[in-house]
Amino acid sequence: MPVGSENAPEDFALHRLSWPDFDELARAAGGARTVRQFRRAERSRRLLLLRGLVDVVAKVPDQCEPLPSPEDAWEILARVQARAPRVLDRILAHPYTGSWVGYTTRLFHHQTTGVCPLWVHVGHVHALAAAAAIHAGLPFRTSVPVWDGGAILPTIGMARLPADEPFSVADVHSDGERVQVRSGSTCVRLPNDRSAEAPGWWPLRHVSVRTRGQSFSVHLDDIDPYRGLHEPVLPQRLSTDEVDTWRALITDAWRLITEHLPEMAPALRAGLESLVPRPAVPFRMPSASTGEAFGSAIVSRPVDGFELAAMLVHEFQHIRLGGLLHFIRLREKDPRLRFHTPWRDDPRPLAGVLQGVYAFFGVTMFWRALAQRGSDRRAAFEFAYWRAGTWDTLQALRDDPALTTAGHRFVEGIAAELGPWQDEPVPADLAEQAVALIADHRAGWRIRHVRPDPDTVRAVSEAWLAGRQRLAGVRVADGRTPTPVSDGSWSQARLDLVRLSFVESADSASWSAVPDATPADLAYARGQLTEAARGYRTELDADPGRPASWTGLGLALSGLGAQAPARALLTCPELVRAVHRRIRTSAANAVAPDELADWIGRFLP
């Protein structure tokens, strides 16, 4: 599976990945050596993109003004390469060098502006060159772009200057030791210890921890403009207290990873070098990464080290897969939004599903390791939930014709590892709860994104109104293409409440703070199923279209043993709701949702 040609010149080093290494990656194995292979390939890819960008921009000098030609930056980088080649490697390996060069190349070729004027994005190459020269101790003089008063020196920090206008230029000068950033009459002198705060100077934060003999170092980047997922963003500087909070969380998370996933720790240490901190989102754990910013993850502040450890494993899986995808294609282009996943509320394309399966395979692995080494019910539930949800999604993916031969091999490698976990012992109540909540999410996805066949809706409605005991010739189609346009909103309250039950008692104030939680949801989470069913009926009386009330009723009835209505509400809720809507407009008397579901459920296979 080489990149390049067997007939390449001898002075070219080909980037190769063996099939055994490929298969190890599919099993979420593979150590730091494979990650370093990805890093070397990323270096070559970024250097090629950088040279290509410099070449095309140099041909249109007006795209650079008021900054110098990118050729000037290239000359500085060439000097760095001659004196300190490892410094150039460091600059090229910086995650946001990758996101910048990809973003700017696309802007230039499409001749669009982006968040900033094009010259600001193109001019970032001068900031990279300046940072490289500073690391190498070279004397130099150059100009860099300034956005809202911030002049970034990637991997080092940001000079803060007066901002009379959104975009301007600053001069950067060094004699090889002392560095100055000047704009007009303002001069920021970088301290000798560039990791220290100084007037007008924000250093790049760094966190280093060590547990069980394994160290982990990561940047806490709140300043680089290209740290965002899709577009550049302004700094969001953390306070000292916030940095201390993150340091404690990272310490706890690294301890958990080295203790429970020691075989993954060396690879993660080699592959994750930068975290982009985001504010906490109550009851959510949003995180993100992009293949262009290899080595970086955007992470919202979690509640505890357990959540952060799971997020780090999750994003590291994305990082590894992103590196692999620069070696080999696992799928053909297929933008159709057609898959359900338990980690997203909208229909997903094949590319997103493949990424999600691999990431949550890692999350499942983490919680499995914790569940195996103790009696932690939280870990056991998370293991049961993610193994079921990831396995279900993987089953929908395995035979997809849009996967390449390598893609099928990769997916089967995941399945070989994940499949046996489905039978591993978990407390029965937790396993049942996990499966029920996966079914809840799938039903909620169907009722919002699958439109039932109008002929079927009409036939079922007429049969009900006629008082028939059979649905002769009527089939409930299960394979209808979903639509991205949602018919109603969704609530994650039941899952949030169940998760909360492992850390707080049911009468705590946090339960009432769960977004969109209703009294029926609270009853369901407490195991009061009769009360929950009654509550969901009341909700549907008030709002017959609410998706979470329909599926909640199905969950409660399933727990009470009412299999026929539960089957209808959890396997084809879109049909039940559509028939209910039609009947309400035709019948003189209201129809009870569970009675209709019971009638439809008796005719389902």
Image (cartoon, rainbow, N blue to C red):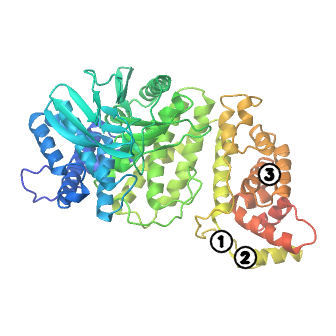
Give how far apart the Cα atoms at labels 3 and 2 are: 25 Å
Q: Dot 3, crowdedness within 10 Å: few (<14), some or many (≥20)?
A: many
Q: Position of residue 366 (x, y in %)?
A: 48, 36
Residue identifier under label 2:
456
Is any atom of residue 69 visible in this view? yes
Discs 3/2, front: 2
Q: Position of residue 560 (x, y in %)?
A: 81, 48
CB atoms at circles 2 and 1 under 8 Å apart? yes
Q: Position of residue 528 (x, y in %)?
A: 81, 40
Secondary structure of the residue carrying tag 2 is: helix
Looking at the image, is mark 3 or mark 2 earlier in the sequence?
Answer: 2
Please state, as top left, top right, bottom left or bottom right, where the N terminus lies in the image: bottom left
Q: Residue 360 versus residue 537: which sits nearer the camera?
A: 537
> Is the residue 83 above or below the residue 356 in the image?
above
Q: Dot 1, crowdedness within 10 Å: few (<14), some or many (≥20)?
A: few
Please give left or right for residue 298 compared with residue 383 in the image: left
Please state, as top left, top right, bottom left or bottom right, where the C terminus lies in the image: bottom right
Give how far apart the Cα atoms at labels 2 and 1 are: 9 Å
Image quadrant in which you'd find residue 449:
bottom right
Residue identifier under label 1:
477
Secondary structure of the residue carrying tag 1 is: loop
Please give left or right for residue 436 compared with residue 74 in the image: right
Is any atom of residue 469 visible in this view? no
- The three-letter code of the residue at mark 3 reads Leu
Q: Residue 249 versus residue 350: which sits nearer the camera?
A: 249
- The three-letter code of the residue at mark 2 reads Thr
Looking at the image, is mark 2 or mark 1 earlier in the sequence?
Answer: 2
Give how far apart the Cα atoms at labels 3 and 1 are: 23 Å
Residue at the spot x=38%, y=22% of the render? 209
Q: Residue furthest front?
A: 185
Residue identifier under label 3:
557
Q: Residue furthest right?
A: 588
